[in-house]
Amino acid sequence: MKSDNATDGCQPDRHFPRIVTDLGKQGWSLASGFLDETAWTPLFMRATAIDDYRPAGVGRGDNHHRNGFVRNDGIFWLEVGHIADAVWLDLMEQLRLAINRALFLGLFEFESHYARYRPGAFYRRHLDAFRGQGNRVVSTVLYLNPDWHAAHGGELVIYPPEATEGQRFLPRAGDLAIFLSEKIPHEVLAARRSRFSIAGWFRMNGSTGERPNPAF
């Protein structure tokens, strides 16, 4: 009987050991072919069908604002009631458990949105969280761009600690980038065609008796 889970055939959990090893040693990892075509296609179709992308901002809470000099992509938060979104969120829950078992990071929950970069859009070098100021711990980016070539631009650039220059990765469909949110600066270079991805963050529970900390 065929499973309803679109990730069954490609067994993405085979990448988990390498991901947790890389995170522990260097703070980032790139899982090439994390999803195969049968698994990323429903997510790509979902991303391209969305007509309600909202302009992305920078900062969180009271400090959240739009800044076109820093970024000019569009975002749409995943919805647990949509089957393609639910399958991806379920897989990220499996990855959360695997990271916690290996690295004891205390990851509590996951938040995630689709991202669309129109031709010319970018996101300048930044950190996803600042030490002591947030609770995003591990960042993920799943790419959804079939037939993507170097001429299309849009590379992810990761700046490992103490590296003299950044490492560039093409946003090819099915590849997953993952890195420590507080330690790995990164940027998205301008693309020459529309570029789609799913960005996500594993978070710690920052709630206190006086300050709840919901995911959204």
Image (cartoon, rainbow, N blue to C red):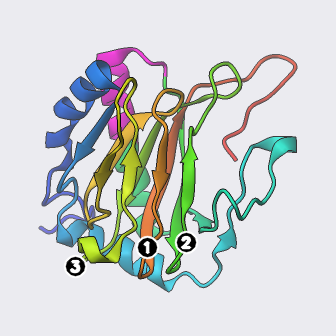
Identity, as a three-letter code, of the amino acid under mark 2 = Ala
**Towards the viewer: 41 or 177:** 177
Badge 1 crowding class, 10 Å Cα cut-off, few under 14, some 14 to 19, many 20 or more, is many
- Residue 149 drawn in magenta: no
- State the separation of the CA atoms marked 3 and 2: 19 Å
Which residue corresponds to the image point at 65% horizontal and 80% vertical from the top-left? Answer: 52
Q: Is residue 36 left or right of residue 188?
A: left
Tell me which residue sits at (34%, 17%) in the image.
103
Along the polypeptide, which appears first: circle 3 or circle 2?
2
- The residue indicated by pointer 1 is 191
Magenta segment, which residues? 93-106
Q: Position of residue 214 (x, y in %)?
A: 72, 38
Q: Residue at x 40, y 37 (%)?
A: 159
Name the element at disc 3. Answer: loop
- State if disc 1 and disc 2 touch (CB < 8 Å): yes
Q: Is residue 64 above or below residue 6?
A: above
Q: Earlier in the sequence, mark 2 or mark 1?
A: 2
Q: Which mark is residue 121?
A: 2
Residue at the front extreme, as displayed: 164
- Which residue position holds label 3? 147
